């Protein structure tokens, strides 16, 4: 069943975006009495299509259970090229990441002023929305404004991690065995070329813990997806200690 997110609900009417109406009528070619899933404010509504022109829906069932991980995972990632960020946003959304923070780092090739970022953010939010619909989430990841390395140290998280280019012993999956009663985690990943030694040192001096992804060198998009997948596995299994693998 096709899923759509809506931002408005007027009385008992769920208000679809014009782009979603176009998708229902012209792409999916749905008919009267076809069913769709509509998510509003993290609540899932099973709807019947009563009319196509104009499109009208009736709610047949309501499901309040959220389809999300039991941890709040944030990935803070250095600004990267467009084709890479598109893939990163899509896959992190599918893996259940709660928040994505674009970070202006020393080695970031991409530099965005406020106007350019504003336009990019609209596109990025659409990528996350579509990936949330495809993966049957009941929420859409938050994309924050661009932050600096200094901004990251002031954020409130139970566990703060940074993908290190120096650390060799603390592998990400085994490090997570020691995490207990942890609700909020942030992982910082550098852009193409990695996080600079100066930036890494600054984070380590401010309560971030270094972790390794192993001996292989990952591209930035691979590193982000790998981190998201490891956290997803642990959250789904509920294995935070000696039960891991």
Image (cartoon, rainbow, N blue to C red):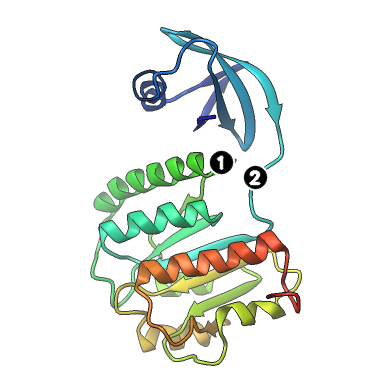
| Residue beneath the point at 43% across and 40% down | 130
* 235 shown above or below 192: above
Q: Determine whether the residue tagged by mark 2 lies in a helix, strand or loop.
A: loop
Determine whether 170 is above or below 154 in the image.
Answer: below
Left or right position of 172 against 235: left
In 3D space, how far apart are the residues under numbered discs 1 and 2 (Cα atoms)?
Answer: 7 Å
User: Residue tagged by mark 2?
Assistant: 67
In the foreground, 231 or 143: 231
Q: Is residue 178 above or below residue 62?
A: below
- Tell me where residue 37 appears, x and y as whole percent: 57, 28
Camera-side residue of 139 and 119: 139
Residue 21 badge: none
The answer to whether the residues at label 1 and label 2 have Cβ atoms under 8 Å apart is: yes
The x and y percentages for residue 125 are: 40, 45
Q: How many marks?
A: 2
Q: Residue at x 49, y 52 (%)?
A: 93
Q: Is residue 45 toward the left or the right of residue 80 in the image?
A: right
Image-based side of 213 in relation to 191, left or right: right
Q: Considering only order in the chain, which callout, 2 or 1, is on the residue closer to the N terminus?
A: 2
Q: Could you say where residue 186 lies in the image, as x and y percent from the top left?
A: 55, 68
Q: Which residue is mark 1?
A: 136
Q: Quadrant of the N terminus?
A: top right
Picture coordinates of residue 114, whole percent (x, y): 28, 54
Quarter of the image where the C terminus is located: bottom right
- Left or right: 231 in relation to 111: right
Examine the rendering and report whether any part of residue 145 can be seen.
no
**Pointer 2: residues within 10 angstroms few (<14), some, or many (20+)?**
some
Residue 55 location, quadrant: top left
Residue 73 picture quarter: bottom right
């Amino acid at each position: 069943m096709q899923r759509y997110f809506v931002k408005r609900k007027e009385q008992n009417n769920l208000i679809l975006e014009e782009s979603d109406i176009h998708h229902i009528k012209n792409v999916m070619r749905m008919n009267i009495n076809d069913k769709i899933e509509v998510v509003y404010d993290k609540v899932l509504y099973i709807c019947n299509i009563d009319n196509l022109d104009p499109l009208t829906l009736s709610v047949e069932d309501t499901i309040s259970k959220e389809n999300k991980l039991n941890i709040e995972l944030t990935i803070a990632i250095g600004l990267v090229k467009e084709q890479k960020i598109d893939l990163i946003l899509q896959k992190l959304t599918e893996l259940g990441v709660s928040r994505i923070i674009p970070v202006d780092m020393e080695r970031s090739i991409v530099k965005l002023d406020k106007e350019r970022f504003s336009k990019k953010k609209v596109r990025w939010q659409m990528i996350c929305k579509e990936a949330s619909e495809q993966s049957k989430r009941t929420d859409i990841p938050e994309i924050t404004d661009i932050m600096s390395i200094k901004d990251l140290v002031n954020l409130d998280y139970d566990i703060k991690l940074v993908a290190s280019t120096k650390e060799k012993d603390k592998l990400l999956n085994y490090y997570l065995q020691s995490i207990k009663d942890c609700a909020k985690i942030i992982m910082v990943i550098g852009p193409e070329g990695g996080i600079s030694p100066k930036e890494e040192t600054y984070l380590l001096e401010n309560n971030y813990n270094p972790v390794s992804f192993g001996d292989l060198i990952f591209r930035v998009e691979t590193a982000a997806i790998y981190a998201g997948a490891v956290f997803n596995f642990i959250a789904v299994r509920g294995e935070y200690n000696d039960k891991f693998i």
